[in-house]
Amino acid sequence: MQKTLKEIARLIDGEVLGDDATLINGVAGIKEAVRGEITFVANPKYLPLIENTRASCVIVGRDCDTPKRPVIRVENPSLAFAKTVSMFSPGETTHPRGIHPAAIVGKDVTLGKNVSLGPYVVVEDGVKIGDNTTIYPGSFIGHHTAIGKDCLIYANVSIRERITIGERVIIHSGTVIGSDGFGFATIEGLHHKIPQIGTVEIGDDVEIGANVTIDRARFEKTVVGGGTKIDNLVQVAHNVVIGENSIIVAQAGISGSTVIGNSVTIAGQAGLVGHIRIGDGAVLAAQAGVTKSVPAHTMVSGYPARPHDKARRVNACVQNLPALYEKIDRIQERIEELEAKLKSKA
């Protein structure tokens, strides 16, 4: 398949700078691209790579200066490139179809139209699964769980009893939803388990990465709001409430009963204590140790987490400690010299 830059620009709502009749036959990363392929740059720090790429065209932001090769300027280079990839790689992934003979389906199960269950899927009593939902081999669906339409559940996912999953939800392999919350009462040195009798509610259009754990509530429900995207290896504890369209990156951990607003970004390995609130639009930087509530539209970083500008100043001071120590040591030596001179004159 070949497309001109003019055709591509029309698809991605872009502006061509250069020869719009240039033919493109594929897509690639900026370092790997060769003549005839199109690539993109979204992060400004990679703009210097444009000078050396062999790509025939680069998708860039609206504010990018005109380089020495054809470009298509767009509002969002990442989104535009994703659309371009779809143009050149339109093939759909083939998912399993139908109910495999090795699937185990319990009593009073309601299956919508075109539901697909792979081999060794276990669906317990009273489960409801919506139209066009696909469940890959080895997954477990606990009793009285409800899964909406057009969901995609990959291999070896465990969704325990009485869980609610919305529509168009994607859950990747190894994830566990509805495991017991971590609740124990310690009496005379012994840890006694506190029953976790709540549930989990996942909204529409949520995507959950591989090996994520979302614990059921002690009472009521743990909630993941619609449109939220969760990366691999994230821990969501009991009674956590996550708003809509938030992003939670790999290895983040959220302690129990924390409330997270809409459009929040929690970067990799950030850790949140329990019973705090994160306001709408807040950004928690990578490895932030969040020990108290964060106001809306605030960026915090460091440990303990503090406003990002302040955290940067603190970190700069820490980096200067060796030089500061040497300077103080020299001052101390000079003070001792001056004191010795004063004594000799006395």
Image (cartoon, rainbow, N blue to C red):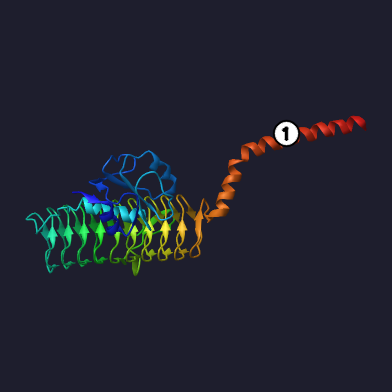
47 versus 118 height, above or below:
above
Relative image position of residue 139 (x, y in whole percent): 19, 55
Above or below, comparing residue 264 to residue 56 in the picture: below
The residue depicted at 31 percent of the width and 49 percent of the height is 19
Q: Provide residue 320's location: percent of width, then percent of height.
A: 61, 41
Mark 1 nearby-residue class (10 Å; few <14, some 14–19, many ≥20)? few
Q: Residue furthest right?
A: 346
Question: Residue, x 45% and y 60% (percent of image)?
Answer: 274
Mark 1 lies on residue: 330
- Most extreme residue toward the top, as rendered? 344
**Residue at coordinates 40% horizontally, 46% vertically from top-left?**
67
User: Left or right of 146: which side holds 223?
Assistant: right
| Position in image of residue 22 (x %, y %) | 27, 48
Residue 74 in sight in this render: yes
* Disc 1 residue type (three-letter): Arg
Helix, strand or loop at label 1? It is helix
**Residue 158, quarter of picture:** bottom left
